[in-house]
Image: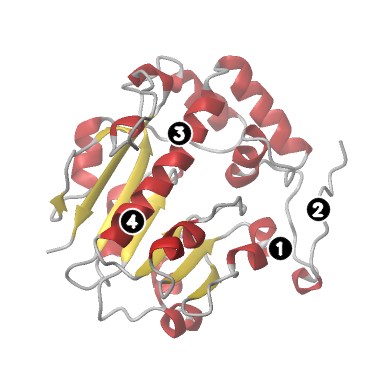
Amino acid sequence: MPDAQQEQPDHLGETDLETDRPHSARVYNYIVGGTTNFAADRETATKALEGWPGLRTSMLANRACMRRMARYFAGLGIRQFLDVGAGIPASPNLHEVVQETAPEARIVYVDNDPVVLAHARALLTSTPEGRTAYVQADMRSPDALFGDPALHETLDLSRPVALTVIAMLQFVEDAQHLMDALVAPLAPGSHVALTVPTGDLAPESRDLARSYTRSGIPMYLRDRAEVERLLGGLELLDPGVVPMPRWHPEPGDEPLPDTATNMYAAAARKP
């Protein structure tokens, strides 16, 4: 399998793609069947799947949960979205889901992987009524993220925003400080959606975290109480912090056992 699996656009210039090191977005891409990944990513993914073949099921459940959260927020009337940790585009992307309900919605995607940047044009296919933008930034530097002109050209932070941090906080040791910094600039009435890996559910999850860490991608698991604390000061929405498949499942969804996934899902409102 070739390492340059999709053509990179000219605007990357001399950007170092760091293809010799695994990146979480590209590992995820490979596990769910994508082609935007490199040998180091595939090696890490293969080891992870050997330890837990059900990881693919959990990742697909995470993607489905993201879509449900996006629809839920759009149904509440939220028309501005900030997706931190966008990942490599995979349709339907968040803006496609949201703009089905609200064509006028505005979405800003954030990621720090240059390969995501290379494919960001797939995240910019907004409806004529709405708008999408992409910010190349590290979520661990919130000041730089919120200082980016593209964010302010797209979102009005004086009005409610839906902040989505989906399957990202496992890569941050001090997730509490980060979440506080991401929520602070948002207006009252804003909403937050999280999916957060845990060792409470799938028994293989702790081995998975060790495998990622050995591969150079440190992974931190959090229990239910820690996830609740990440949303401290916010109004936790029903059904609270639950395994992903239990978060507002679609009618007719075949329920997965809790041990089939390794993440909690939760949403909250900023008073």
Residue 232: where, in percent of width, then height? 16, 50
Q: Out of 82 and 170, give the one closest to the viewer.
A: 82
Left or right of 242 in this view: 210: right
Seen in the picture, residue 234 relative to 129 is either above or below; the reply is: above
- Residues marked 3 and 4 touching at CB (< 8 Å): no
In space, the residues marked 1 and 2 are separated at their CA atoms by 9 Å
Residue 108: where, in percent of width, then height? 47, 69
Left or right of 244 in this view: 184: left
Q: Out of 141 and 130, give the one closest to the viewer.
A: 130
> For mark 4, what is the residue?
178
- In terms of secondary structure, where does tag 2 sit? loop
Looking at the rendered structure, the kind of residue marked 4 is Leu
Looking at the rendered structure, the kind of residue marked 3 is Ala
Count residues near mark 2 (Cα–Cα under 10 Å), then give few for <14, some for 14-19, many for 20+.
few
- Residues marked 1 and 4 touching at CB (< 8 Å): no
Q: Earlier in the sequence, mark 1 or mark 4?
A: 1
Q: Earlier in the sequence, mark 1 or mark 2?
A: 2
Picture residue at 45% right of the left edge, 62% below the top: 100
> For mark 1, what is the residue?
118
Q: Out of 123 and 3, give the one closest to the viewer.
A: 123
Left or right of 73 in this view: 104: right
Residue 6, numbered circle: 2
- Residues marked 1 and 2 touching at CB (< 8 Å): yes
In space, the residues marked 1 and 4 are separated at their CA atoms by 26 Å
- In terms of secondary structure, where does tag 3 sit? helix
Give the position of the N terminus as an image quadrant: top right
